[in-house]
Image: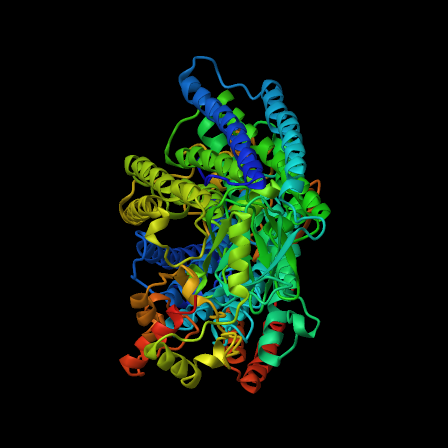
Amino acid sequence: MAIGTVARERVERLDRIWQERPGLTGWLTTTDHKRIGILYLATSLVFFAAGGAEALVMRTQLAEPERRVVGPGTYDQLMTMHGVTMIFLFVIPLSIGAFGNYLVPLMIGSRDMAFPRMNALSYWLFLGSGVLLYSGLALGHAPDAGWFDYVPLASRKYSPGPGVDYYALGLILNGISSTLAAANFLVTIARLRAPGMSLNRMPLFCFAILATSFSLVFALPALTTDLVFLELDRKFGLHFFDVGRGGDPLLWQDLFWIFGHPEVYIIVLPAFGIATSIIPTFTRRRMAAFPLVALAELLVAFIGFGVWVHHMFATGLPEITMIFFAAASLIIVIPSGIQIFAWCMTMVTGKPEYRTPLLFIVGFILFFVFGGLSGIMLAAVPFDQQVTDTYFVVAHFHYVIWGAAVFPLLGGLYYWFPKVTGRMYHETLGQATFWLVFIGTNVTFFPMHISGLLGMPRRVWTYPSALGWGPENLVSTLGAFFLAGGLVLLAANLIVSGFRGKPAGPNPFGGATLEWATSSPPPPYNFAVIPEVTSAYATWDEPDRERDAARLERGELVLEGGHRTTSTTPVDGRLDEILDMPSESPWPVTLGFLATLGFAFVLSNHLVMAAGVGVLAAAVLAAWHSNEPEAA
Amino acid sequence: MTNPATGPARDIDTLWWAMLAGAMVVFAAVVALLVLAFVRRHRADDVSHDDRGAYKVIVGGGLAAPIVVLAILFGFVIHVMPATSAPPGPTKLTIDVIGHQWFWEVRYPGTAVVTANEIHIPAGTAVDVRATTVDVIHSFWVPRLNRKIDMIPGRVNRIELDAPDPGVYRGQCSEFCGVGHAEMAFDVIVQPPHAFLAWLHAQERPAAPPAGAAARLGRRTFLTVGCEDCHTIRGTAAAGRVGPDLTHVGSRRTVAALTIPNTPRMLFDWISNPQRAKPGSRMPGFASLPAAERHALVAYLEGLR
């Protein structure tokens, strides 16, 4: 569209106001949700590579019976770090940190998150937690009690080394980061939506992030409490889990899974959101049953809090308890079923164009149904009691977490690649990669169902040849390397395309949500004029977008008088006030560094030093708050 | 699944096959929808945003059908649960199985019998297994006989083993319990009732006195180099409680929780360097003992039948 001189002047003013420092300093002090999203993306992918490498070493060890590539001590560290990495340092930071951060403000037509500096702090704390956890591995003290770290194995008596402390303190820090991020999303989604974006016009991806954030806010305290109890037991000799002194090891399990099962939905809900973003674009059809899908996303998060005991069916609980939780675990199938049929029916009634992102979503639907069905089986109490803690469960949750949660993230990497980089990825190579990764996933994880049914327990570093579990394991190992090869190709495609890809333009796929209404990559202020919204498919509403251009000429909601964005009412999305947004700041990164340092001091039992760092951190927090911009 | 040998294991097996059949139908339905979408992708008419047709399928497939299917499954589950539950009260035979890092202690209450890693039970008899632990959480699981049950500090969990046919059924720890987790297996040996009773009486006797010079040297070595601190041999001064009871170790099929077969050669290697066969084992190596004394130990232990 042609831009008049007045409009250009307004845009140039916005450019000046929203410009951040160049170079490394800019990355350290940034509060731009897009740059923070990119930091999350890069960091989580590095951790993904580490977690993947750990998996490949384990698969090499398990390829044949009685191999000795690594010993059980190393294997236990690898298996624990693999789980912790993939969940806390890869999937959640990638889905919520990277995709959520980059996309939510764009999709709701805002210029930033509600608390930009807190957003930066979330990232730096996340980075600190990852560095802390991996410093344990580097020093040879990685945690080795499994990712769910059951006591008393994880108690000081049975795990005297510092490994479990790296786990506990690293995850407490990680939890603080996630809590800040979740709170930020809740406020952002409630208050920063563009004028006219009432709840029923909010993109389903944002509903998914909303549901996820609610889950995080309510689930993480259970984990944090559990971890604090564990550290009090380990470091100060308390007895929360010590049955000899009135404690109870099942307390750990209950608290862990009160967090741990909602966690599964925290992992998978953003993936649902990505599916509901990609499907309408490539089928050229609005999402079928939009209100049902939105409701289902929220219901999954809610019911997810009532099913945790199905992780504990073998602990000898009363039957009535197990029946209740089995019923809840079956009921949660229903909102998932609604979404599956909604995705499928959107494709049936639309005209799907099978480009790479949609292929990954089709793969996701298949994996989600498959892993969901084996999940229903695990709600059947006697069957669960037979196969729990075997490779059947390993197969099940890799279909769900890898197949269902990560496939949409991979599809999303392709889908939003043009938006983030301004360039197109290589389509043919992208489709080929999909097939490699899809086949690799099945070859890796399908045989694990069989080895589990044959009786192979999980978390064994080796197995005797007489039991006949060799062939399934060999196939899994070959599949894992095949899968890794596919992922290397995926990375190569995106990296090379980032430099050489064809220019993408603002909306190469004809996407419906607002991120496609601005340039690729978007300017620091996202939108030259805050868009006004009349449906959930704002970019398809061409007259609205033409009116935006006219409003830019008139200077309506351009907000070029300062670092500003709009705030609207939570339900109806009516314009409420103009917000002065904080800009770049050195304090979040400083506070993130100090918090990590303080945790490292606690870990190494330098409690006085830790207290000193705490005082410094308080001073930084004071400086942070003395530096807020004045209201205009 | 792995060839169920009892009623409860068969019930679980039936549940599995029924669920698998149902799951395949559901999976096929979703695949059919995805194929339909693929086949119709180039059709002539314009895309309609009317959801009325789609709603019928979504509510039918995502809400109505699951409610029916899940209700049936729930009924099935409640029907199978009692079969796999602990016996309501004491049965004819009670056995205590106690998890250790990393072996299984087996006691027969009312008798002096204590053994390790081999659970002998009579065929056709409901056996009440009381599962506990002395250290971390373990899980007692014999896939062909029944579900698994965790062994949790401070709790006594119970499970019933009722095997109709004699045979050897392998079990393995299925809750991660530290570095020795993979080498913590056991056998359930189901015997005809008279053979079981004979075995029980034999096990009740204190250890046989050593026969021959080598075995006598072996016993002296056992009682002087530290073995007795961890192991019990009834009828001698050895009364340690850390490692397995060795009163009748010579009668067992394996050593170190099924890690190695119980042959003189393997036992010698085990005593010399337990870490080679079972990394992380709590047993110290005795490679520093003169080979003659290690051979004597083997002779003594193999004679404890």
Q: Is residue B264 visible?
A: yes
Where is residue A64 drawn, in percent x and y?
Answer: 30, 52
Q: In this orientation, which residue lies closer to the viewer: B47 or B32?
A: B32
Q: In this orientation, which residue lies closer to the viewer: A447 or B213?
A: B213
Tell me the residue at 53%/49% (across/down).
A388
Tell me the residue at 35%/40% (across/down).
A443
Tell me the residue at 47%/80% (across/down).
B228
Where is residue A63 drawn, in percent x and y?
Answer: 31, 51
Query: Is B294 drawn above or below residue A397 in the view shown?
Result: below
Instruction: Pick the quarter of the image with the N terminus of chain A.
Output: top left
Specify whether A201 is left or right of B105. right
Q: Residue furthest top?
A: B44
Q: In this orientation, which residue lies closer to the viewer: A368 or A105?
A: A368
Instruction: Pick the quarter of the image with the C terminus of chain A.
Output: bottom right
Tell me the residue at 53%/84% (across/down).
A606
Specify whether B267 is left or right of A195. left
Where is residue A369 drawn, in percent x and y?
Answer: 50, 34
What color scheme is it?
A: rainbow
